Amino acid sequence: MFTSLMLWGLLTSCSEDIIHIPNTTLRVGGVEQVEGTDLELRIFTEEGQCVDAGVKESEMKDCLPYVDRASGQVRLAFDFRYDSTQFEVPLTAEFLEVYHMGARVSPDQPPMKVEIIPHNPVRTPQLFILVIDASGSMNTPDALGLTRMAKVKEALLDKDVVKGFFPEEVKSAVVLLNFTAGKPVPVGTAGVEILKNQKRYKTLVRESLQPQGGYTHLYDAVEYATGELLQNEEIKKFLTLNDASPTIIVLTDGFNNLSAADTCGDNAVRLSRLLKNLRERRTGEGVELDLRPTVFSVGLGRPIRPRKTIEDSLKRNLVDVDPGKLCGKYAGSRIDGSLEKIGIDNASLEWIAFHGGGFSYIHQDVEGLGKAFQGAAAERFEWFELRYAVDQFYLRRAFESKLRLVAFATAEAKLMLYPSPWFDAPTGTPDESGWARPTPLRASAAVVMPILGILISVAFFGAAGFNTRRALFGRTRRVKPKAPPGGGPGAAPPAGGAG
Amino acid sequence: MNIFLVPYTWQRHLQVALITGAAGLLAWWFVMSWFTFFGPFWSLEWDGALFLATCSGMIGGAAVLAEGSLRRRALPSRLALTLTAAGISFGVGFAGYWLWTFALGPALFGAVPDSIDSALVSLRYRLGGFVIAGLGSALGPLVTRKFKGGVTQLLSGAAAGLFGGAVWHLCNFTIYYDLYLASALGAFTWGFGYGVLAWGIPDELYAGWLRVLSPSRYGLRIPVDAMDRSPKERFVGHFPRGLDVWLNAEGQVMELHLSVAVDGEQHYKARGLTLQPTVVRRFLERIDLRYDPRRPAPLETRLSSGDRVVLGQGDQATTLEFIMLPREER
């Protein structure tokens, strides 16, 4: 009766939505996708999904969810899907927001940390549209006499950057433009030329990329590169034939500046207009994910505003920019001859990159610029491993992990994780970077066996100690008998003796 | 367990505790390994019930098995009693978990929605489960012992469950965050605590013996206790018609020198029966028991395991020791 009751209880209480993760004491619920996003963010919860995503046998151990409560670490693996097929993206930790029980996991607030480990790199065909600021300020030399344009050229000719723009695996190409006032113009050619080989690209960069002088119509350049230029027949043809996606990299050393009287605050309305257009071009109806432009911004110089002052606006996905948000205390300051000497408008670049689905880089040296270009031309990956750490306190109970892709495209999914509240599998072993790796179950023998061994030993300690003590006090050996005066020792007792 | 390996020292009271502690640890290992390796066939809500019930069942069963081994019960009987106790302990631990989770816990701490969240591990909502399961671990052995030592057993079980839950919580949330070791230590503490509190090895498994340490008749020994555990007295001397321990007169042993008696409550006493020196020696203590003619009754003193009795004096004195050995030595 009791057994039947138990079995009935066990069977009826089983939930089909919650599954056990092998070799752990963790269960997970179903992955919940947020509706209305561009991509499906598929968090792996079963080995079959890992296999389907191209996870190698040797990496299978990194594919399924893992929670190490002793160190407060969580590991999830995921990929992106578009129309049910895998969609490779160039994801880094900056592009992914991680929420633990509804709170953002911020890597800059220890003990929280986030790391994305991409797996299975692939190159996808791309058309890189380089939009380089050619205003007069690009002729400004640094302390060593190297002009800003010379730094840009050196970075663009770096072999790793060139390799990124022209990968061997797939067909990619470059369109090289510079801009001052008005529409950006092709570098070294009369019309738009798609540079399909390294030699031509290097020649044009080396010989034709020069400062032109004039104001910096940054917003117009982005507007043109993401709109009118993509309607160019040659470009459309290249994108279609090669199944390539357009990646726009815009570089500037200052501010959007249309006239000598412009102030920083004047740019707010213009930027808002650009962002609205940009959003429409990326997420408007009928825009195919493959063909939507991705905009990376590269600033050459010193930022005038701390990033945290604009983070809130970025988080809220705002496109309405007011002078205060854009410029802070510099809202009324003139750009020409004043602000442009202090630094660059990193806020605009952040906004443009955020709404352009890319990333903003600010650097002052050749090496930094090279890394920025490489970042924009980065490989894409088939699947990703996310590791994040929070205070152990927050792993005391079931929790929800939510992942949100914030650049390139939109994708969001959440997963409930249910670590057993009563016991855990062996505590993870930290690797060289401090992230816990699952410890095999057999390691639990290292806890159980010594303790059982000690228990068994202790069980004999009593007897051993007792006998030792008796031996030390002379109770276990016969003292040599003295010569008896009469009647030998051990003489037999009379009848009725000891019993 | 074997009573022959358990000398009559204070450490004997830890012997069953070591077994029940090991049982708790193995119960944890079994549940954790099953969960990790095979995966649970039960749902999340049942984790606590099965974990606590398994610990309860194995600890209760181990206690009965240990007792059966110490008492040398017949193997079938030993196994039957063990399984019965384990089953009862498991059942009580299992039912007690639900009783606490759905009735007692909410009644005591209010109907907080979290209190029935099976993934919540706050001690407030879990301690009662440990205590009831601890009671369960005592109830199984109690039934098989026909309720002998009822209150002690039950209180010990509840206290052991409480200790186990406290260690589980402290190791996981206060001292350090490691539920792996915390659950192992919690289960071990529960078992060990129960063994210590409820299972001191009873004196009835031992009997007092007199043993000769002197060269003459070295090693000769006799039990003081009667087979039926009734009061009994043993005599030492060299009266020609024989005594319980016959010793040579040359060893300064008088004809009727000493008696050692045990009463119905297994208290041992030595009585001096001669005017010759008779001294009981123990740590930092010497008691002269020689007969005082002015007193109507002989002098006597209690005897504890390890005490020595010196008969006579000087080089010719004879030494006896009183020692507690397993009753089965007979």
Image: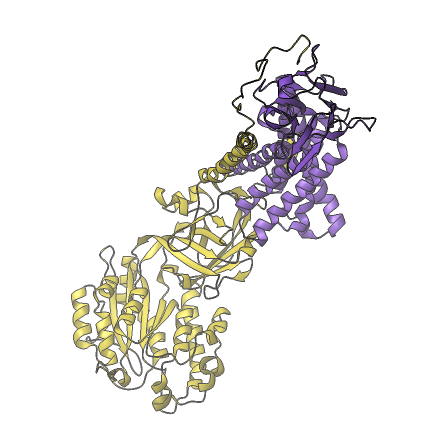
> How many discs mark residues in the rendered view?
0
Position in image of residue A316 (x %, y %): 51, 70
Between A189 and A256, which is closer to the camera in this rendering? A256
Q: Quadrant of residue B162?
A: top right
Which residue appears at 56% of the width and 53% of the height?
B175
Q: Is residue B144 above or below residue B20?
A: above
From the image, which quarter does the C terminus of chain B lie in? top right
- Relative to A32, residue A204 above or below: below
| Foreground pick, A187 / A318 | A318
Q: Is residue A369 above or below residue A499?
A: below
Q: Quarter of the image holding residue A482?
A: top right
Q: Residue A22, image x and y in percent?
A: 47, 40
Residue B195 pos. (x, y %): 64, 35
Horizontal and vertical percent position of residue A275:
43, 74
Q: Which chain is yellow?
A: A
Q: Looking at the image, can residue A282 be seen?
A: yes
- Relative to B135, does residue A481 appear above or below in the rendering? above
Name the residue: 74% across, 30% down. Answer: B301
Colour setting? by chain
Q: Which chain is purple?
A: B
Q: If the image is split into quadrants, where does the N terminus of chain B sit? A: top right
Residue located farthest toward the right when viewing the structure as drawn: B296
| Farthest residue, direction front | A485
* A394 horizontally vs A48: left or right: right
Q: Is residue B64 visible?
A: no
Q: Is residue A128 left or right of residue B87?
A: left
Residue A243 versus residue A359: which sits nearer the camera? A359
